Image (cartoon, helix red, strand yellow):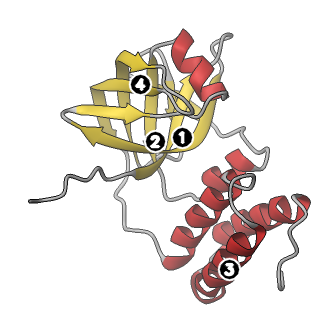
Amino acid sequence: MARLTSRIHEVIVTTLDESGQPHSAPMGISEVNGYFLVKPFKPSSTYENLKLHRQCTINYTDDVRVFAGSLTGRRSWPTLPCKSIEGAYLEQALSHTELELTRFDDDEPRACFYGEVKEEVIHAPFRGFNRAQSAVVEAAILVSRLGMLTEQKIIEEINYLRIAIDKTAGDRELEAWGWLMVKIQQAGITLDHD
């Protein structure tokens, strides 16, 4: 019997807050039976925004500073207006998908919003992630789980990811990596070297 799996894609979800200002956050989303599933943790700004305004944008970007920045207090990324929904997408997005959220399950610890595609736009080609970009995304996921994982697990993972940073990082990846390492150290975790 074949195992049914859902692929999770690491993206940036942009929502609008109560005052209509864009809020961008990294999130793993999946596509099942023609719907995009957006599953923010509760409580979170993304969750509150989606309950209030049932539209959002999925941004696909290779600028990993957005992933790291969202977790380290750097959320002011330029946006542009969407075409088919009331919303915004990241200016540096390589492509974006505009979603209308048709229903949601208010589960714990994560709600599940079901989004129908209203528009998909390609702005520039995606040439793939280099290893350092992938390492920054994985480190950002670790930072988002600082209260859930053991200190030893975080140290082991960071030490492994650092190999890719040392070998293939450019300026953007080094900047993003630095932000994440400071956040980990602020959580009281001592890393082997910086």
Whichever of callouts 2 and 3 sits on the residue coming sooner in the sequence is 2
Element at label 3: helix
Q: Which residue is mark 3?
A: 156
Q: Which residue is mark 4?
A: 113
Residue 91, labelled with which disc? 1
Q: Is residue 75 left or right of residue 16?
A: right
25 vs 60: above or below: above
Whichever of callouts 4 and 2 sits on the residue coming sooner in the sequence is 2
Nearest to the observer: residue 101 or residue 129: 101
Which one is in front in this view, the residue at disc 3 or the one at disc 1?
3
Q: CA distance from mark 4 to mark 1?
A: 24 Å
Element at label 1: loop
Whichever of callouts 2 and 1 sits on the residue coming sooner in the sequence is 2
Q: Position of residue 150 (x, y in %)?
A: 73, 65
Q: CA distance from mark 3 to mark 1?
A: 35 Å
Label 4: how many Cα within 10 Å (few below 14, some 14–19, many 20+): many
Q: Which residue is mark 2?
A: 59
